[in-house]
Amino acid sequence: MLEHDTAWRQAAQDIVRAGQRMDQRGWVPATAGNISRRLADGRIAITRSGGHKGFLTEDDVIEIDPAGRPRADGQRASAETLLHTQIYAHDPRAGAVLHGHSVAATVLSMAATAPAIRLTDYEVLKVFEGQKTHATSIDVPIFDNDQDIARLATAVAPFLGKMPGGYVIRGHGVYVWGPDMPTALARLEGLEFLLACELERRKQ
Amino acid sequence: MLEHDTAWRQAAQDIVRAGQRMDQRGWVPATAGNISRRLADGRIAITRSGGHKGFLTEDDVIEIDPAGRPRADGQRASAETLLHTQIYAHDPRAGAVLHGHSVAATVLSMAATAPAIRLTDYEVLKVFEGQKTHATSIDVPIFDNDQDIARLATAVAPFLGKMPGGYVIRGHGVYVWGPDMPTALARLEGLEFLLACELERRKQ
Amino acid sequence: MLEHDTAWRQAAQDIVRAGQRMDQRGWVPATAGNISRRLADGRIAITRSGGHKGFLTEDDVIEIDPAGRPRADGQRASAETLLHTQIYAHDPRAGAVLHGHSVAATVLSMAATAPAIRLTDYEVLKVFEGQKTHATSIDVPIFDNDQDIARLATAVAPFLGKMPGGYVIRGHGVYVWGPDMPTALARLEGLEFLLACELERRKQ
Amino acid sequence: MLEHDTAWRQAAQDIVRAGQRMDQRGWVPATAGNISRRLADGRIAITRSGGHKGFLTEDDVIEIDPAGRPRADGQRASAETLLHTQIYAHDPRAGAVLHGHSVAATVLSMAATAPAIRLTDYEVLKVFEGQKTHATSIDVPIFDNDQDIARLATAVAPFLGKMPGGYVIRGHGVYVWGPDMPTALARLEGLEFLLACELERRKQ
């Protein structure tokens, strides 16, 4: 194993703690979810394939290049690595990407007939980039699930830059990101809170 | 940074721990919520703008004057500071104010057609000031959300003194208060418990 | 304060930890709930009036006589003490009594038109005294809430000995008991699990 | 008590921690559930009868032979031991078996009219053995509850080898297994997540 510098270890710790937080909320069941950070120097740290995201150690975090290939031989990155690198390539300010599976995201996306989940008039919308008021709507696009991640990334591409609330993969989970881990986590919590509200509202 | 005295640090600790408690219950998602304490000597301590209320430190608590202005240059109080100072101005006994965002408060207030949520016949009503029996009703007023907090405070003003169960801002969250932090927290838990009951009863 | 012997302190610790457990589950919101233990020598330890049951200390546990009167001057026992002493008087084997407030117990009892909640065919029924199979029914009686606890105790009295699953006070909460604290807690968890199932089944 | 070797103690610790995890999720209410591990040398460790599975110690784990009989005199294994040994006998790779009781499993199995719960198009299906895509269905068989465990095992037997998602006992709970404890726990979390989704989808 490589000796890691302070910046790397900080990024790895960000990922470990984000996994613990997501697990407390029930958003990374089984081996679901993956988490990444882009460092100031451009290196990308991401969770390795498999394993429970609530019980990560720093050794479960590996380095990938901008095309999603592990830097070290014999390492295997998360299957959905390409969805992370796509965001970093699109948005030079992106510093953290989170992917989780919640009951609300799964159920709402499977029930949806529209191509997006529309979130309207919620105060919490203000957590998303560029939002200054609750008196607005944000569309969270839903993409069909696909085991061919390159093909899924192609479907997502045209929407990058138009998704302040992130996106949902049907029957699968959400993707959100931000300039740093606290912001990405705040957006994840905001989105999941709003999806939980939407789920409840359908039962009233 | 100022050297803080014991009374201030106790108030700051009350706020830090209240934030942790609200986070455990899921009532401060993302950067939502804000928390304040009025000390015996009249100083008001409140959470600064932004940041997660589940991970506060004493440095995230700042002093404001009775009009809601930070005492120190360059500090920024929570956007909704005026709703806190309004309560302290109205009620000389008020020593703590809590504002949180729950799924139940959000969903019920968005579904409501009446101007208040009526809570009837619950034992837990006795947690609210002046209530001696379950055999009563309390109306929790709902105010329309407004990014203009001064205007929102004006809408709230006529109801101050008539809201033992606090109030709800539509699609946003609840405000409750009490003479000290334990009492304010008990009223918050009581209100959220009753809103959770109301949400369930609509599905039966 | 009296010096307490080992048996008393063990009983007080049982109560403190039961309160923490009930709080984790959300069954003692605000200042709700109360908890007692009868020691081998007949002394009864119970939570004092008020305060949050998730944050008890040994000093929050006081001694009462079999009629429910505090042994020490100036102490105030939980308002519902009489419902505890009634159980101890009826059942010489009872060593712990638990009273909590859950959303499920509150909502189901307020919706009920029958005088009891009937629980049928659940494996978990076996946690209740004398139950050897799931293929049975247990009726959990519902009593109307009453601020006159002596009158409420009179309503409960005829059913003592016929309530292996405890009982529910309408819009208020449950009472369960057992020979020791682990058994009482297991019955509480069993009852609350089954009430949660009943609540869900009504929405299917 | 026997002196235990390192391999045994590791297995016992796996069981203790699995119980804590299941308790956090609310899947072992009261004294429900049981947990076992088969060691590399063929010994089988299982929770003893009774007691809360969230508060196990190593002493609550006992050794049984492949027919489910305790190795030491005077010990009593979980009532459902035979359902564990049946899985170990069928699948030589099985190293851990988990049985829990959740609200979702209880309610869905009691509402079901079909002989299985069909799970379709979920990403999380990939946690089950041999599943490479979400675009598939898995049937989780439901067996009627029976206090005669030998008879219940006979009903389960024909399905062994055809249940990648484990199975459900009606009004009772789930059984899942895997080559080691982390895999068994991941499958349990995956199954419970999907049952929670199914429960929500019925309310939409």
Image (spheres, coloured by chain):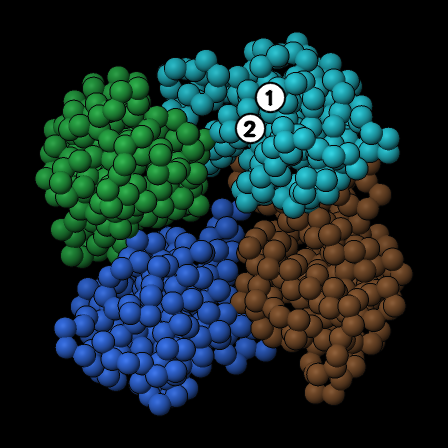
Chain colours: A green, B blue, C brown, D cyan
Screen quadrant of the N terminus of chain C: bottom right
- Residue sticking out furthest to the front: A3
Q: Residue C3, can we see it?
A: yes
Q: Nearer the viewer, residue A40 or C193?
A: A40
Confirm or deny contact between disc 2 and disc 1 (CB under 8 A): yes
Task: Say which amino acid is labelled 1.
Answer: Gly
Residue D144 vs C85, above or below: the answer is above
Image spot of residue B57 (x, y percent): 33, 66
The number of numbered discs placed on residues in the rendered structure image is: 2
Residue D76 vs D82, above or below: the answer is below
Which residue is pictured at 35% across the width and 90% down the height?
Answer: B41
Q: Residue A104, can we see it?
A: no
Q: Which residue is mark 2?
A: D181
Categorize mark 2 by other alpha carbons within 10 Å: few (<14), some (14-19), many (20+).
many
Q: Nearer the viewer, residue A102 or D57?
A: D57
Label 1 marks a residue whose chain is D
Which residue is pictured at 39% across the width and 64% down the height?
Answer: B19
Residue D170 vs A12, above or below: the answer is above
Which residue is pictured at 41% across the width and 78% down the height?
Answer: B10
Categorize mark 1 by other alpha carbons within 10 Å: few (<14), some (14-19), many (20+).
many
Measured Cα–Cα span from mark 2 to mark 1: 7 Å
Q: Nearer the viewer, residue D78 or C177?
A: D78
Image spot of residue A45 (x, y percent): 25, 35
Say left or right for B72 vs B3: left
Image spot of residue C203 (x, y percent): 53, 40
Secondary structure at numbered mark 2? helix
Q: Which residue is mark 1?
A: D95
Label 2 marks a residue whose chain is D
Image spot of residue D163 (x, y percent): 56, 15
